[in-house]
Amino acid sequence: MDDWDDIRWFLAVAEHGSTLAAARASRVSQSTIFRRITALETALGLPLFERRSSGYTLTEDGAALLPIAAEIAANVERLTRVAAERQRSVAGTVRLSAPEIVLAHVLPPVIGRFRALYPAVKLELVATDRRVDLASGEADVALRGGLAPTDPSLFGRRLTYDRSVVAASRAYADAAGLPQSLADLRDHPLIRFDPPGAPTALLEQLIACLPDEAVVLRPNTMTAVVAAVRGGLGLGILPRFVVDREADLVHAPIVLPLPVFELWIITHERRRHSAPVRALMDFVAAYVLAGQPPSDA
């Protein structure tokens, strides 16, 4: 049996005496209930009802299975109720760190739905591209881009893959066109992410993609890069997930020589068994998790 809802339809037809009456009471189509009852009988290998002009009557097999089905339905209802009670009982404060661009473009709907399920959990959000120190308690949970953590005291999982793309506003693309190759980038005004501090290996690769003589703007945050690109000031390299979420942005058909971006959610080992921390990590993972690398398109 593939669908536990079939038991609910079995009980509804037994109670109301026909698929039509059960459909009206349940506010679903009669054909749906008929199809699911047939599927349940096929899965069980037993006829549950005798179809008569006056309605549906339980067979001997159906009558024998009815109390078991009722018990299963009661257990499912109890399971749902206990799960909801446990969700409501999860309480505390969780400090979540994430890159500013992830906080702005990925997390808002996730956080809204999490808060609806866990109203007693308070979230403190830290928007930073810096790797916070989880061991010292700068944050309880962190979203990080890059490869898997190598620190054995950190626990987490990869959420998704992404690629960087050359992005432009639709207005800019309509007016100036999009580059078709890396060589074409020198013919466009470029916006390059320029954070404080020594550049990482990934940033050095990104810088190498953008001819210095064509760079006209150097914002120090990725959110500022998004705003400048959206404003039509030039082309910028942005994560694909940002461009896909912005109706005003498009990307050029160029495959950049940059590694695939990985997004991880992690916590310190000593915090992994905290109920609110575990609830947040599981919820974010279930919401964001993507199992396949993106295409080069």
Image (cartoon, helix red, strand yellow):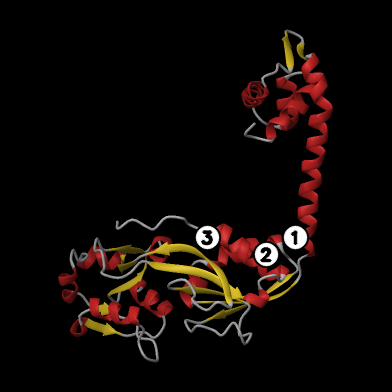
Residue 214 percent across, percent down from the top left: 20, 81
Between the residue at mark 1 and the residue at mark 3, the CA separation in whole angstroms equals: 20 Å
Tag 2 secondary structure: helix
Q: Nearest the camera: 152 or 253?
A: 152
- How crowded is the residue under tag 1: few (<14 C-alpha within 10 Å), some, or many (20+)? some
Tag 1 secondary structure: helix
Q: Amino acid at mark 1?
A: Gln
Q: Which residue is mark 2?
A: 279
Q: Earlier in the sequence, mark 2 or mark 1?
A: 1
Q: Nearest the camera: 256 or 273?
A: 273
Q: Which residue is mark 3?
A: 288
User: Which residue of the protein is positioned furthest toward the bottom in this rendering?
Assistant: 197
Q: Determine whether label 2 and label 1 are within 8 Å by CB.
A: yes
**Image quadrant containing the C terminus:** bottom left
Query: To which quarter of the image does residue 175 belong?
Result: bottom left
Residue 146 percent across, percent down from the top left: 43, 73
Q: Is residue 40 left or right of residue 264?
A: right
Q: Quick check: 188 above or below 292?
A: below
Q: Which residue is mark 1?
A: 87
Q: Amino acid at mark 2?
A: Ala
- How crowded is the residue under tag 2: few (<14 C-alpha within 10 Å), some, or many (20+)? many
